[in-house]
Structure formats: C-alpha cells, structure tokens
Amino acid sequence: MQIRWRRGSGWISRFDRHLVRKVSRFPGGNHDVFFRRLSASANHGKLWMGAAAIMAAFPGKPRRAALHGLIAQAVASAVTNMGFKTLLPRARPLPEHLPVFRFVHPQPTSSSMPSGHSASAIAFAVGAGLVKPVVGAALAPVAVGVAYSRVHTGAHWPSDVFFGSAIGAGAALITRKWWPVRPPFPAVSRTFTQAPELPGGAGLSIVVNTLGGSFTQETAGALQEVFPQAHINKVEPGEDLSVEIQATATFPGTVALGVWGGDGTVGTAAAAAVEHSLPLLVLPGGTLNHFARDAGTGHLKEAVTAANRGEAALADVGLVTVERGMAGNPETAELVMLNTASIGLYPNLVRRREMLQPALGKPLAGVVAMFRTFATGTPTTLLVDGVRHKLWIAYIGRGRYYPRDHAPLVRPVLDDGVLDVRMITADESFARLRLLWSVLTGTVATSRITHLSEASTIRVESDGSPMVLAVDGEALAGVRTAEFRVANRHLTYYSPQS
C-alpha cells in the first residue's frame, strides 16, 4: 500500500494528473493570491476557530452549531493527521505539475494523503450545518474554497482533497450520532372544560405573594385595574403564605382562585384549589412562569381573556407523600406537586444558571453552571424503587417534558398521567470525569450517566442521612422517603381556547 501511493500509479494517479493539468491551464491573476491566503488562513484550524468565535456571540442554535463544528473538526483532524497520514504516505505534487508561482511556500512535508485542511473545513461546515442549516449553507462556499485551494496551490492532489472531505463529513455525521438532533416538540394538547365566567373579576379571589416572582409595588394596583371586582389578598413578609392562601380560597363569594407568585406559591395555591374544588387562574407573576406558560396564560392579557370567557382545561397533579424526622417516629405529610421535584445538585445548578443567564444566555449558562456544580459537588446515595444509585440529580416532572434529554423546558400536555423521571447517576467508573466530559462536550443527554424513564408512581428513599427534596422550587430538608403518584385531571385551570 505504501509503495503504491509513493509511486502514484494506477487510475487514481491518472485521474489526479488529469485534473491538475486542467488547473494548471488557468491563467494567473489575483485569484492565485486569494486562494493562497485562503489556504493559509485555515492553517491549524485558525479560520474555523474564528468563525466559531463569531457564531458563539449569538445564543441558541448558532452557539451550539459552533460547538458541534469544532468537535467535528477536532475528530476529523485527529483521524486525518494521526491515522491516515501515517497509513497512507504519499508524495505531494511537484513544481513540474503546476505553475511555480502558485505553489504554497513552504510546502508541507507530511503525507499528501489525505488533506487535513479539507477534512477540517468540511467537518466544521457540515457539523455546524447539522445544528443550524442556514449557518452551514453560509460556511459551505468557504469550506469548498479551502478544499479547492489545496489543489490550486499545489499542496495536495485532488484525490487527497476528496478523501479528506469524506473524512470531514463522516466525522460530523458520527459526532452527530452521539449528539443527536432534537426532535420537534409535539403540538400543545389540552382537555378543555368549562369554568365560571369572571367578568371584571367577579367571584375571583387572588392571592399575591409580595416576596415571590416579579412582584412590584404597582402589581396589586395593576391587577385591581384589570379585575376591578376581584378580591385581592397581598401576603406581606412575615405572614404565613399557606394560611393566607386558605383564607383567600374561602373568602365569601369566591368561585375561582387566582394566584400571583413563583412556582412554590402557585403549587400551594393549586393544592388549595383542589381541596376546595375551585378552578385556578395562574397569573404570570413568577420569574419563569412554568405553569402559566404551559397553561397558555403566560401573559396577563391571555389570563384575563380566559377568565372573562370561563375557558378552562383539566390538569393532572402530582401527590407526594413525604416522611421526615426520626426513623422510628416519622412525620408524614402530603404535598401537591404541580410542576417538578428534584433531589441532589439540581437546585444549585438552577441557581448558578439563573445568575449567569443574563450575561451568557441560557444554553451556555446551563453548560457553565453544570460544570461548576458538578466539579465541586458530591453525589447522593438513594434507593429509587428499591434500586440503589449514586445520583448527581434525580428529577421528577409532573407530566412529560420536552426536549427528551437532561434539560426539560416545556410541557405540551398537562394531563398525560405520567411522571417524567430523569436521573444523572454517578454509578459508573470515573463518574466525575465522565460527567465533566459530557458537560463540556454537550453530550449529557446521550451519555450513559443519563437515565430517562416514565412512571405513574415512584418511591425514593435516603440511604443513610436524610435528603433535601425540592418540590416546585420549595426545599424540604430531613426527608427520608418520598412517594410520588399522579392524580389524573384533579385540577381545573383557566386556559384560553383560541
């Protein structure tokens, strides 16, 4: 094999020489300088690192496209330079094959087969394009230009470029296999029902948590303006939120309960609404408004429309039975879970992500927050349905969240009857290194440390010291066991039907 490539015999050599003769007949001009400079700009991947830096300035898909392009380029470069160039030594074109003024100086001394520049260029363009096709289309002419420049400047034979390009495309596709494209989210689906119409807020009692979410001094006045006939109860610092929510739900003449606050406040109000058989109007008063967004009332105008028309839907709620205290004399409590529960390092991760998000954007903030959290944190040993695990995170969502990876964002269906269970484990060898690598490369979702499942019930027990359980953002310490189950369509909530 080595002798064949050195001699340059066979049909590949004839094909190469035929194409090079065609290129050599091109008249000289400014294009020679252009291709020489383009070729040089891609040395050591400088061109693609610069492109990635520009793409990373834009959050979302451009940033993910830059990361995947660099990973694909790194794989292609390693395979080319440390693999095939050793296995397939080949002499580069000589000045007799092309005009001397076109030759790159100094000419590389490594094997001509395959072209590393071509492999890196195609890998980056295809890798980025798999994430964001518009970016890939913009990069494609540049990548093809770099590949052609290696022939134009006499650095490679055409077959070197073709083989290198194939390696680059293959590297991008292979890396995409363990970093798959997220499938589209399913369409929003709700089970609609009727609820009392609340024109002007008549019959509506609203509890407002002044310590939660996006409350300002103008909030109560704004709510009174859009619901002039509603009863509004502002819960001030120092007051018992649960007691005040119960008082609001039982206020004379109340036919619907409204809530303004964060996830914990909304969860407590949902429990009161279920207890008193009241429909719940969730107003966008939280920081992220998880349930309001899923319910279609992420904006105040949408909530007012649904309330005035009496448009509502049905949602499942999670019921969490918690045991705390001494093992021989536990205290039992039952909590209503409207959104999510978590155990382990997830609360710290969310706190760090929210602090970094204004400066970095949500995707990159999530990566940095995960890296910092898991670099310093320690796993928790738990029994999950009787199976012992070392866990970095145990996450339980009330309803199927999307995307179906480690980072749940939206919940298109609120009455699917399932618990969305996601665990990031430390059971594997080299657990911390494996975790940090998957965080760094963005492959947590496809790593062996991530376990995704669905259930209608789940039991989590501490193995040794009690655990901290966060339900809808509210932390509960000293928990020994927690049993989760689904109460199907127990909650009526206001939701616009159009």
Image (spheres, rainbow, N blue to C red):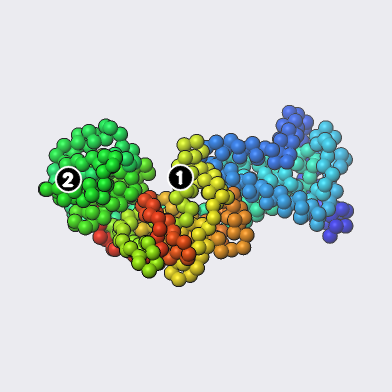
Residue type at the position of mark 2: Leu
> Taking 253 as reference, is 69 left or right?
right
Residue depicted at 42% across the width and 56% down the height? 468
Mark closest to the chain's N terminus, 2 or 1: 2
Q: Position of residue 295 (x, y in %)?
A: 30, 50
Closest to the observer, 406 or 332: 332
Q: Answer with the quarter of the image where residue 237 lies.
A: top left
Position of the N terminus, as image quadrant, is bottom right
> Taking 267 as reference, is 420 left or right?
right
> Taking 234 as reference, is 430 left or right?
right
Residue type at the position of mark 1: Arg
Q: Position of residue 476 (x, y in %)?
A: 38, 54
Residue receiving disc 2: 204
Residue 14 showing in the rendered view = no
Closest to the observer, 60 or 104: 60
Residue 380 is labelled as none
Residue receiving disc 1: 351
Q: Position of residue 408 (x, y in %)?
A: 44, 53
Residue depicted at 61% across the width and 46% down the height? 69
Closest to the observer, 209 or 369: 209
